[in-house]
Amino acid sequence: LSYGLGMNRRIFLSAGLAGLAACSRTPSSLRKLRVAAPLGLSLSSLHLSLEAGFFEDAGFDVEILTITRSPEALAALAGNKVEVLFAPQNVAILNAVTRGLPVRVVAGREFISPNCRRMAFLCGLRRNFPKGLQDLSVLKGKKVAAGSSISFMHFALDEHLKTAGLTLDDVTVLNLSGPEAIAALLKGALDAYLLFDESLLPETAEELVFSRSFAEIRPNFQYGLILYGQALREAGTETGRRFLEAYFRGVREFQRGRTPRFLKEFARQYGVDPKRIESLCRSHYTPDGSVDLKSLKAFCDWAFSRAYIPRPVEPAELVDLRFTRK
């Protein structure tokens, strides 16, 4: 697929799951919206809204563009190459705002639910850690993968390490994620991997050991966000609100058990059992789009303490909450 964005197209997948977005009808009366989103299970609700026609009902012709790196996606949002961005909390968002770019968080999307499956936890091979990973002091000096950019996953890794009196400076952090990180772990190219979702664990003859879930450290931490660029923020409150209403309609349907084709395609791509994926807990979505400012504040303070941003950032600088007010 060619998206004609006039930018580095390596941030978008050119085949497979991204092609599902091309199935929607494109009546001329609909407002075109390009939505950039990572490839992940959490995007099932977004794809459900597209597949079920909820966006069309709200007056939008939505195209989902699959991103692999948040910084490039932020640049696309700031440059009006895309109008909406689904992303985890990441340093690129903070730096975009401190540089005066017209991008803002408009809604919260997902949180680490203590009542759901294990999320944001470390895994390693038992032969390397025979006593397991409950005491993370064994990771000192080790190589650990934690995502492809400085984001919530790096924050979560640092919070995990703090339980053993360590910081990110005590390990070598590799920017790997997904199947690439799993393959490196099994080959011994890295010692541990901060896996986002236990449902993505491969079936392997190697016995794995795990740390605690992030929910045990920071329960209900909100990591998933929705951002608007300048075009949609200036289109009027009603327009931006209609998009969110259509999306959260898909969230409610997904939580009730409705499954999009996307989820089955995703399972096949990752080589996991689609039935296992379909039966997963779905209670980790923020149902009304409210933004947890405490979670934002914790991430901002962490990013400044690590010198990832040039100055302290307050959550109020990051958000535009007009579109979720009733």
Image: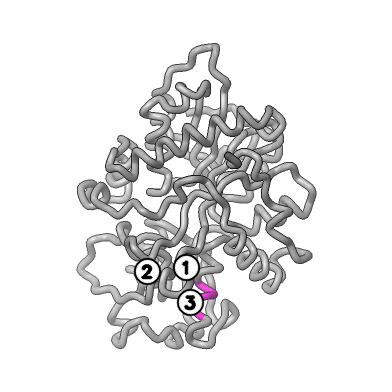
The residues bearing labels 3 and 1 have C-alpha atoms spaced at a distance of 13 Å
What percent of the width, then of the height, locates residue 166?
54, 84
Q: Residues within 10 Å of mark 1 (few under 14, many from 20)?
A: many
In the figure, residue 114 lies in which quadrant? Answer: bottom left
The residues bearing labels 1 and 2 have C-alpha atoms spaced at a distance of 9 Å
What percent of the width, then of the height, locates residue 51?
37, 29
The disc label shown at residue 145, or none: 1
Q: Please indicate, yes or no, whether residue 242 appears anywhere in the rendered image.
A: yes
Q: Is residue 90 magenta?
A: no
Q: Residues within 10 Å of mark 2 (few under 14, many from 20)?
A: many
Relative to 169, does residue 264 appear above or below in the rendering? Answer: above
Q: Which residue position is annotated with label 2?
A: 185
Which residues, given as a range, are shown in magenta? 157-161
Quadrant (top left, top right, bottom left, bottom right) of the C terminus: top right
Q: Are marks 3 and 2 in contact (CB under 8 Å)?
A: no
Q: Which residue position is annotated with label 3?
A: 160
Q: Residues within 10 Å of mark 3 (few under 14, many from 20)?
A: many
